Image (spheres, rainbow, N blue to C red):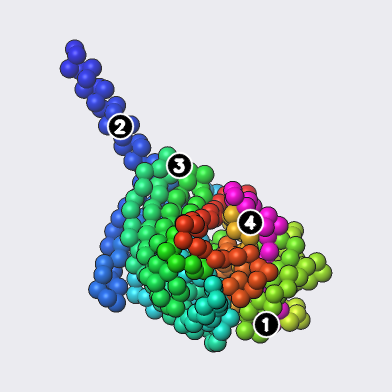
Amino acid sequence: MKIEVLSWVLALSLLSGHATEAKTNIKKQPFGKTPEGSAADLYTLTNNKGMQAAITNFGGIVVQLRVPDRKGNLADVVLGYDDLDGYIHDKAYLGALIGRYGNRIAQGRFTLGGKAYTLARNNGENTLHGGLKGFNQALWRAKELPSKNGPALQLEYLSKDGEEGFPGNLSVKVIYTLTDDNELKIEYSATTDKETVVNLTNHSYFNLAGAGNGDILQHQVMLRADKFTPVSESLIPTGELRGVQGTPMDFRTPTAVGARIEQDDQQLKYGRGYDHNWVLESGGSKTPTLAATVFEPGTGRVLEVWTTEPGVQFYTGNFLDGAKGKSGKVYQRRYALCLETQHFPDSPNQPTFPSTVLKPGQRYHTVTIYKFSAR
């Protein structure tokens, strides 16, 4: 009798263990080799509601994000490629972790602590998203983490002193958690041994109707921002914080992306559409606050962006050029939008902007949450 009881206890224990594993399920599989011959992997996270996020340790890239619509049907809502080779040759940063500095630094240079630094220029005369080989082309060290909120994947990378011209050995850690509330939570942290600048973000391209399923001009966007940072012709901020009222930049109430994107406005001409930093009302916060929402009328999918960052780059895929993506779908201009949470572009050269300086002994730490629902 005692043996039978023990058997049942053991069986229940095993079942309980399997239930816990299912809740924090991560499937690992090979994803090809880098140009240097190193093996990359793909990690598929599944929460207890069936939502999935596939992430590779090459570039920390979000390869796939399967999200339910109002009928419960899952679809992949991020642009990407079927294999590693697509990401190796990608010029649009699809789904990638961005660093050491997200967005642009004017003329590829800045001064810090009285010393001038020159960076690799990869966007005309400017540095964009970390330079010629940013974090999006790095192979990160991956580790599956135990989490009671859903499956979690930790990625680590050491950006060595002088990499792409940036000072200091920067130790970076990024944790992706797919919560059971259908949130993709991204937690960034970093430390340095020398004074440096850092601005990390994720560059996922969203189409809530499904990746490659037409343009995003009917997506309704709300941004909790009453100011934005206007730019010059080379898309470098002028230093001004300009009010959005009475301009095509006013998304304080939900507005279709295409409603004003073709207006005769100099800022829209410079960006070939929206490609600007909005100054969030929160000004940056210790805990994530709502920064933006996106609603796709056809499927009912809703995306909420919560962040501790002071800014968000709203980009409408203006430079997508017909690249062939997943399942052979072609990504045309404005087939997706990005909401890149961040400190402001060119902050190292803009003393009035929130500082992006990180010193030894300090810890860089930001959190962004992409939360999905349907209505």
The type of residue carrying mark 2 is: Leu
Q: Residue at x 47, y 57 (%)?
A: 361
Judging by the rendered image, the residue that carries numbered circle 4 is 284
Let me know if residue 63 is in the magenta part: no
| Amino acid on which disc 1 is placed | Ser
- In the image shown, does 224 or 231 lie closer to the viewer? 231
For the residues labelled 3 and 1, the Cα–Cα distance comes to: 43 Å
131 lies left or right of 6: right
Q: Is residue 67 left or right of residue 288?
A: left
Disc 2 vs disc 3: which is toward the camera?
Answer: 3
Residue reaching furthest top? 1
Secondary structure beneath disc 2?
A: helix
| Quarter of the rendering containing residue 281 | bottom right
Give the numbered dot on residue 149.
Answer: 3
CB atoms of marks 2 and 3 within 8 Å: no
Give the mark nearer the N terminus: 1 vs 4. Answer: 1
Q: Which label sits on residue 15?
A: 2
Q: Is residue 90 visible?
A: no
The count of marks equals 4
Res. 83 mark: none
Quarter the N terminus occupies: top left
Q: In terms of depth relative to the viewer, which is nearer, 166 or 228?
A: 166
Q: Quadrant of residue 279?
A: bottom right
Instruction: Read off the magenta span.
Output: 267-292
Query: Which numbered circle lies on residue 232?
Result: 1
* Circle 1: element type: loop
